[in-house]
Image (cartoon, rainbow, N blue to C red):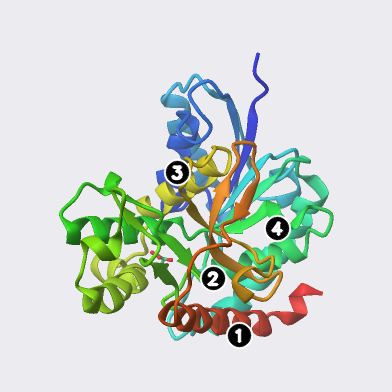
Amino acid sequence: MTTPIRVAVTGAAGSIGYALLFRIASGEMFGKDQPVILHLIEIPQAIKAVEGVVMELNDCAFELLQDVVVTDDVNTGFDGVNSAILVGGRPRGPGMVRADLIKANGPIFTSMGKAINEKAADDIRVVVVANPCNTNALITMANAPDVPKERFSALTRLDQNRARHQLAMKAGVAVSEVTNVGIFGNHSKTMYPDFFNAKIGDKAVTDVITDMEWLKGDFIDTVQQRGKAIIDARGASSAASAANAALEHMRDWYTKTPEGQWTSMSVPSTGAYGIDEGLMYSFPVRCDGEGNYEIVEDLDINDFAREKMTTTLEELKGEREAIADLLK
Ligand code: LMR
């Protein structure tokens, strides 16, 4: 009998949770032979809604779903957890600027970090989805000093997926042809989708899409502004695509990256590409199939890319400055 993986999802009653939980329970994250136990963590006001989701999970009769824990207490929620997806956070309210959001979310992620430190299993892996996800991940990591830093990450897989689709559409190829799109920096409108090192089939993207003005302009703008475009169109933040990206992020962390390829994760910088050590910055990474990754450090970075990577770095340093008191 395979030992089940305990997966915690915070903000379990929200739209991303709703799009995510059923896919985890059906085996899309950890495989069709791997039982799971879901730990659904919510604020007290949303527990009733979570109980409704649990009824629906039960009504799917998922054979891999061994148990569901529902709680508004983070210590119970992260107890023995192997994999944590931090979706819950304070959403941006009317009149709030990004800095307000960073400050409002800080204490939430301080308590998550502490509970993960105390309660999670030794092999815990964490991905933060709630915005500003890079900085929320930094706070979580700083408050879990006994957990190795490389176990903490933030979601930029959504940006990678968006970029792949835009490149495939422009080139008129299937999305499967587009590989090695690395995302550098923050999950925000400053993020840099690296098309120079990306491929279409076995060719460089720039050999297939020769419209450099589009690549340097509309392409980057579209990917950077996609979250806002979805909010404008739907009246709500992306949910199913964010859930899909979180699922792929966690799945691929435990899966060997195909030879010669990479994927994007925001992880604590090792100093690669001159990015401040310890800052939660998105890089192209390769995973070894056993829950470890390494940053792909040998990509060519031209002046255009360097400028973009610095802009997003400066934004992240500003975010870190705003919550410096939570990192002590
Ligand atoms: C997204 O990229 O879709 C979201 O992070 C946007 C947002 O601000 O919620």
Dot 1 alpha-carbon crowd within 10 angstroms: few under 14, some 14 to 19, many 20 or more? few
- Give the CA distance from mark 2 to mark 4: 15 Å
Mark 1 to mark 3: distance in Å? 31 Å
Residue carrying label 1: 318
Horizontal side of residue 313 vs 228, given as left or right: right
Cα–Cα span, label 1 and label 2: 12 Å
Q: Amino acid at mark 4?
A: Met
- Residue 20: image tag: 3
Viewer-proximal residue, 326 or 72? 326
How far across and down, in percent of the image, does residue 303 sit? 45, 82
Q: Is residue 225 above or below residue 152?
A: below
| Residue type, numbered disc 3 | Leu
- Kindly report the distance in space between the C-alpha atoms of the residues bearing marks 1 and 4: 22 Å
**Mark 1 or mark 3, earlier in chain:** 3
Which quadrant holds residue 6?
Answer: top right
3D distance between C-alphas at marks 2 and 3:
20 Å
